[in-house]
Image (cartoon, rainbow, N blue to C red):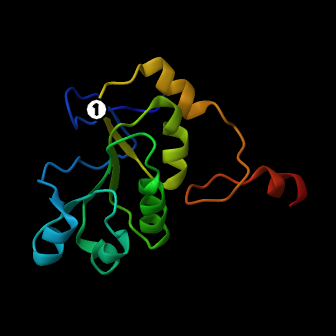
């Protein structure tokens, strides 16, 4: 099992895959962030355009992406976009995060998870390690199986 920082309660970080110190700064909305010059943590809600943050990535330590319902997948796109544009800070999935989604969220660039309801650690470990091979390239370092087969 990867190193984890276990938390409790709403928005507490249950799993974190980073070595740096966790940000304890208050997260602001995207609109509020764009109006401030000193904010270093922001929370993306469904419907927010993550592209608005691209010019500011160097000063952001933490981006939380809210999943108010497990069926809303817009946060996956936001995560991948941010990572593809060079964001290296903490990218935290918060809200209705389910154990079945963990591996996919990691592949999109999430490196911290704060589910509304704590996930079973054994189930989470299984989810993070279930698939040894992947089929499509994304922001993680996994080499797609077709490339392994055909070079």
- Percent across and percent down for residue 106 are 50, 46
User: Up-down: is 96 above or below 37?
Assistant: above
Q: Is residue 145 above or below residue 119?
A: below
Q: Nearer the viewer, residue 44 or 149?
A: 44
Which residue occupies 55% across, 44% down?
A: 104
Name the residue located 79 percent from the left edge and 50 percent from the top edge: 145
- The picture quadrant where one finds residue 52 is bottom left
In the displayed structure, 29 sits above or below 104; it is below
- Image quarter in which the C terminus is found: bottom right
Residue beneath label 1, please? Answer: 116
In which quadrant of the rendered view does residue 83 lie?
bottom left
Q: Look at 30% across and 32% down and name the residue there.
A: 5
Residue 111 appears at what percent x and percent y?
Answer: 40, 47
Looking at the image, the residue that sits furthest to the right is 150
Q: Alpha-carbon neighbours of circle 1 within 10 Å: few (<14), some, or many (≥20)?
A: many
| Place of residue 62 in the rendered image (x, y in percent of width and height, measured from the top left) | 26, 57
Q: Is residue 123 left or right of residue 57?
A: right
Q: Assign a secondary structure to mark 1.
A: loop
Q: Residue at x 25, y 61 (%)?
A: 61
Classify 66 as above or below 115.
Answer: below
Residue 127 visible to an observer of this rendering: yes
In the picture, measured across the screen, residue 12 lies left or right of residue 133, that is: left
């Amino acid at each position: 099992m990867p190193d984890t920082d276990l938390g409790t309660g709403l928005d507490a970080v249950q799993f974190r895959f980073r070595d740096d110190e966790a940000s304890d700064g208050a997260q602001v909305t995207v609109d509020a962030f764009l109006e401030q010059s000193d904010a270093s943590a922001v929370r993306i809600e469904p419907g927010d355009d993550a592209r608005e943050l691209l010019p500011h990535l160097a000063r952001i330590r933490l981006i939380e992406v809210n999943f108010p319902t497990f069926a809303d997948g817009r946060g996956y796109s936001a995560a991948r976009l941010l990572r593809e544009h060079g964001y290296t800070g903490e990218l935290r999935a918060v809200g209705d995060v389910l154990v079945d989604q963990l591996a996919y969220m990691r592949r999109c660039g999430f490196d911290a998870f704060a589910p509304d309801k704590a996930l079973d650690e054994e189930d989470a470990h299984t989810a993070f390690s279930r698939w040894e091979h992947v089929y499509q390239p994304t922001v993680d370092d996994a080499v797609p199986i077709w490339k392994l087969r055909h070079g």
